Image (cartoon, helix red, strand yellow):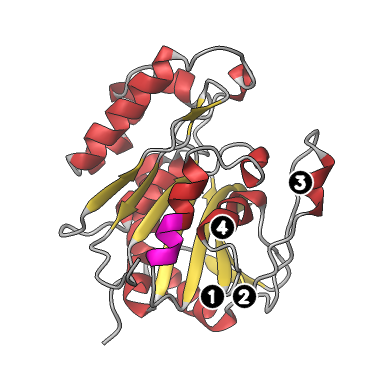
Amino acid sequence: MMATLPVLFVSHGAPTFATEPGLAGPLLGELGRRLGGIEAVLVLSPHWMTRGGVAVTASERPETIHDFGGFPQALYQLRYPVAGHPALAARTVELLQAAGWASALDPHRGLDHGAWVPLLHLLPEARVPVFQVSLPYPLDTAGALRLGQALAPLRDEGVLIVASGSLTHNLYEFRQQGEAAGYVRDFTRWIRQTLQADDSQALVDYRQRAPQAERAHPSEEHFLPLLVAQGARRVDDSLQVLDGGIEHGVLSMDAYLFGTCDNVNSP
């Protein structure tokens, strides 16, 4: 019988996370070395949002998309040469449609930096097939939770769900010098406590309940993947916090693993 795989929320930060691993990169690398039994990785990222429904990549060999500008040239030379998994992509469309989501395969789309940057640390050898699921636009927090619930059965079918976003994401304050902003620490602490309490409704209502939520997320797209991960969470899942610290004063790099990890390899 195939083991149930966990769900991972990861903060992908700025594109420079690819070459500047900070605290979070080694933690993801250690986790990746321990995880086993993965048939494919499903990634959701705020850098792919689609109108009219959910799209799922079906390429045999998805390209590495460099969907950012103004960063060091070395980043544009990076590639994540991984295979896709069209069969599990098609299975994902079936599950989404059964749950009431308009969904279709996209045979041409590659992997955006919200997908391949964290995977460079988590699974650097690129041996496990990867496919990506878009976030439908528009999408609110309750909808993101339902999207995760629709994807949850894939955990029993060899799929590691990676929801890639950012625990805080105020780019108006990006690259500020000095210590981490206090509101970032407060918001990060609230998220950790809320996840430890498994309080989905508080996450859905975070805009009203979390400290300085609108400053932490002037727009919501980078927060929504956390709701997807929470939606795919199960009652008996353990919670592991990967404390990635704070980069550039405003980007909380924490990651969360939801699951019992019964399938991990020996370290």
Camera-nearest label, 1 or 3: 3
Tell me, yes or no, whether the two marked residues, 3 and 4, touch with CB atoms within 8 Å: no
* Residue appearing at x 61%, y 69% in the figure: 126
Q: Earlier in the sequence, mark 1 or mark 4?
A: 1
The residue wearing badge 4 is: 119
Q: Earlier in the sequence, mark 1 or mark 2?
A: 2
Indicate yes or no whether the magenta region holds residue 33. yes
Kindly state the secondary structure of the residue where label 3 is placed. helix
Residue 92 seen in render:
yes
Tell me, yes or no, whether the two marked residues, 2 and 3, touch with CB atoms within 8 Å: no
Indicate yes or no whether the magenta region holds residue 240. no
Tell me, yes or no, whether the two marked residues, 4 and 2, touch with CB atoms within 8 Å: no
The residue wearing badge 1 is: 89
* Residue appearing at x 32%, y 63% in the figure: 6
Camera-nearest label, 1 or 2: 2
Residue farthest toward the front in the current orientation of the protein = 267
Q: CA distance from mark 1 to mark 3?
A: 28 Å
Q: Earlier in the sequence, mark 2 or mark 3?
A: 3
Q: CA distance from mark 4 to mark 2?
A: 14 Å
Task: Check the image and report above or below for 33 versus 256.
Answer: below
* Residue appearing at x 30%, y 27% in the figure: 189
| Residue 181 left/right relative to 174 | left
* Residue appearing at x 52%, y 55% in the figure: 44
How many C-alpha atoms fall within 10 Å of the one at disc 4: few (<14), some, or many (≥20)?
Answer: many
The residue wearing badge 3 is: 75
The residue wearing badge 2 is: 84
Q: Earlier in the sequence, mark 3 or mark 4?
A: 3
